[in-house]
Amino acid sequence: MNTIKLNTDYLQHFVDSKELAGIYEETLRAKQTLLAKTGKGNDFLGWIDLPENLSPEIISNIKADVERLRHRARLFVVIGIGGSYLGARAVIEALQSEFAAMQPDGTYPYIVYAGHTLSEDYYSQLLQTLDSHDYAVAVISKSGTTTEPAVACRIIKAHLEKKYGAEEAAQRIIAITDAHRGALHDIAQQEGYRTYVIPDNVGGRFSVLTPVGLLPIAMAGYNIDQILQGARDMRKLCIDGDSFDNNPALLYSAIRNLLYRKGYKVEILENFVPQLKYISEWWKQLYGESEGKEGKGILPHSLSFTTDLHSMGQYVQEGERLMFETVLSVEHPHSQVEIPSDQKNLDGINYLLGKSLTEINRNAELGTILAHNDGGVPVLRILLPTIDEYLLGQLIYFFEFACGISGYTLGVNPFDQPGVEAYKKNMFRLLGKPGYTN
Ligand code: PA5
């Protein structure tokens, strides 16, 4: 099967088989608790069965909306923050050209983002851009009351209505929110927006395989059936596999907890291809919000190599020994670029002739792993045969399932996020929101 794999070759000096065997029962129990739905946060486990349970009607509605809007919109604005934004962006940026924004009009809209910042300049620049392009919008918020997307929605809705008139604007907005509650739900009802529901039992950061992620991904022109197929195949492995050999999620969560207990408190997710940068951003939210509580939890960090070898590489090699690395290692690129030969060889790189850039990059990866290992950094590798929808579906489900097991092994509720409220209370009080003033 074309599948992602976990490689533990560069962990050997840091974790031995006895230690791994020692944590096996605990990890398996965590997995069983997850599946039996008897652990903390068990009312938020709808994501486990999403790849199987998502109704075909939802998929065909998404496709119909894409067909309806893609010829009318050069840009598609995705309004959302946290789990209502990062999953879609992670997949889209992994699949699209780095230079997609500069390419002539394609057959699908180019996705731009809003609601993830309160920067005035950002909105001013976005509105200027929207002045000169046809566009449509998805507003995504599970609670329907989050300030950042609510502000963005108000600003962009006003712009859209001015540009197209209220009736046409309403045709160009899709709301993705709770079935019954929240300001966004009420606005969508009143204005007659097309609406998708975020299931009650799926939390924000586990929602990429609902319309939250699937609608923007499909709007960008990518194959959501393949994403779901990848997730389905990985789900089967994660649910059926009870050993470290046949269940990568079990192994990954065991290793992270073992390393954490040994004092490796930071996990750096690394890539050697820049299009995976937002996979790391999505992963940081998934693990940071799920595990960082009760004074516990691995700090998730990310780096893009070889770029960051020239900035953070020094710290990883010789700084305080508190991190382990998980490398997203991509085997095959989609295209090739030849290094031209040059008889003069003034730059001294003729020794690379005949080697592909991927081969050079692979050696950079191996050289880095060996150096970091020598510097006392445990390295885990996640091997991706290539980057495509199917494998991204696998990767998403793998990380989600492992997060559930890992959080239970750590002893926290991986499905709540009480800490996210603290800044909001202060912000509301400072801004004078009714009910929050002293
Ligand atoms: O994972 C989470 O639950 C959060 O990151 C939310 O997704 C984020 O706070 C946005 O919330 P909402 O979708 O309610 O606007």
Image: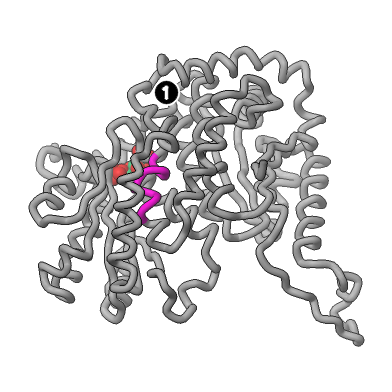
Relative side of 214 to 193, left or right: right
What amino acid type should be assigned to the residue bearing mark 1?
A: Asn
Which quarter of the rendering shows the C terminus? top left
**1 on left or right of 288:** right
Q: Is residue 6 left or right of residue 351?
A: left
Counting labels gives 1
Along the line of sight, the residue nearer the viewer: 95 or 241: 241
Residue located farthest toward the left when viewing the structure as drawn? 190
- Given residues 60 and 407, the one toward you in this image is 60
Could you say whether the residue bearing mark 1 is in a helix, strand or loop? loop
Residue range of the region highlighted in magenta in the rendering: 207-215
Question: Would you say residue 326 is visible in this rendering?
Answer: no
- At horizontal 18% and vertical 60% (from top left) the residue drawn is 154
Instruction: Find residue 393 and report its horizontal and vertical position in percent.
Output: 52, 45
Identify which residue is drawn at 89% across, 76% down: 350
The image's colour scheme reads one colour
* Vertical order, 254 against 299 (above or below): above
Q: Mark 1 points at which residue?
A: 413
Residue 220's x, y, as percent?
A: 42, 63
Outermost residue to the bottom = 344
Identify the residue shown where x is 23% and y is 52%.
Answer: 175
The quarter of the image that holds ligand 1 is top left
Seen in the image, is 427 located left or right of residue 1? left
